[in-house]
Amino acid sequence: MTEQTGSLYEHAGGDEGLHRVEDIFYTKVLADPVLKELFPRRRPHHVEHLTWFTAESLGGPDRFTRELGFRHLIDAHRDLEITEEQRARFAELYEEALDEAGLPDDGPFREAFRSHIEFGTRVAQQNSRARTEEELHPLREVPRWRWPARE
């Protein structure tokens, strides 16, 4: 197997590719009956903020950390009480958006992206149910994803 070079961010098409994904994804969640409680209306900068977060987590610029900070993400999810059905649907729509946005569909890239989505939805779900700071997930910075390890 050939070794992957460059970041996942670059492989995804940088900000342009990720913005396409986030725009498609956000449109989907706003219309989805399972997620309408979590996304009752379009927010002006949501796609931009999602793009910043995903870009940073895939090895791109650290705009999310510099402009908003990780606490913004924690606070955005507090008290949402995300159900397992909602978490799973969020992940499903995200994968659909990757396809619709034309992002690469090679195995290593998609494996890394699925791992990113799965981890992120679990952290958000835990934080959405936390009543105290101690119940929050311990993550306090944007996680960084890399290419999957190959033997």
Image (spheres, rainbow, N blue to C red):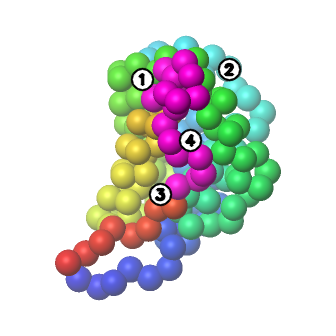
Q: Nearer the N terminus, badge 4 or badge 2?
A: 4
- Give the quarter of the figure containing the N terminus: bottom left
- Give the quarter of the figure containing the C terminus: bottom left
Which numbered disc covers residue 102? 3
Q: Nearer the viewer, mark 4 or mark 2?
A: 2
At x 32%, y 58%, the residue is 111
Does the CB distance between marks 1 and 3 fall below 8 Å? no
In this view, the residue in front, 60 or 103, is: 60
Question: Residue pushed farthest left?
Answer: 151
Q: Is residue 126 magenta?
A: yes
Determine the secondary structure under disc 4: helix
Find disc 2 in the rendering and name its residue: 41
Question: Residue pushed farthest front?
Answer: 134
**From where the camera sits, is residue 36 visible?**
no
Q: Nearer the N terminus, badge 4 or badge 1?
A: 4
Q: Nearer the N terminus, badge 2 or badge 3?
A: 2
Badge 4: few (under 14), some or many (20 or more) residues near its Cα, within 10 Å? some
Q: Nearer the viewer, mark 1 or mark 2?
A: 1
Type of residue at label 4? Ile
Does the CB distance between marks 1 and 2 fall below 8 Å? no
From the top left corner, tell me how far across and down residue 12 is, in percent. Answer: 51, 64
Find disc 4 in the rendering and name its residue: 24
Residues shaded magenta = 125-143
Q: Is residue 134 magenta?
A: yes
Alpha carbon separation for disc pair 1 and 2? 16 Å
Alpha carbon separation for disc pair 4 and 2? 15 Å
Alpha carbon separation for disc pair 2 and 3? 26 Å
Q: Nearer the N terminus, badge 1 or badge 2?
A: 2
Type of residue at label 3? Gly
Left or right of 85, for residue 19: right
Q: Nearer the N terminus, badge 1 or badge 3?
A: 1
Does the CB distance between marks 4 and 2 fall below 8 Å? no
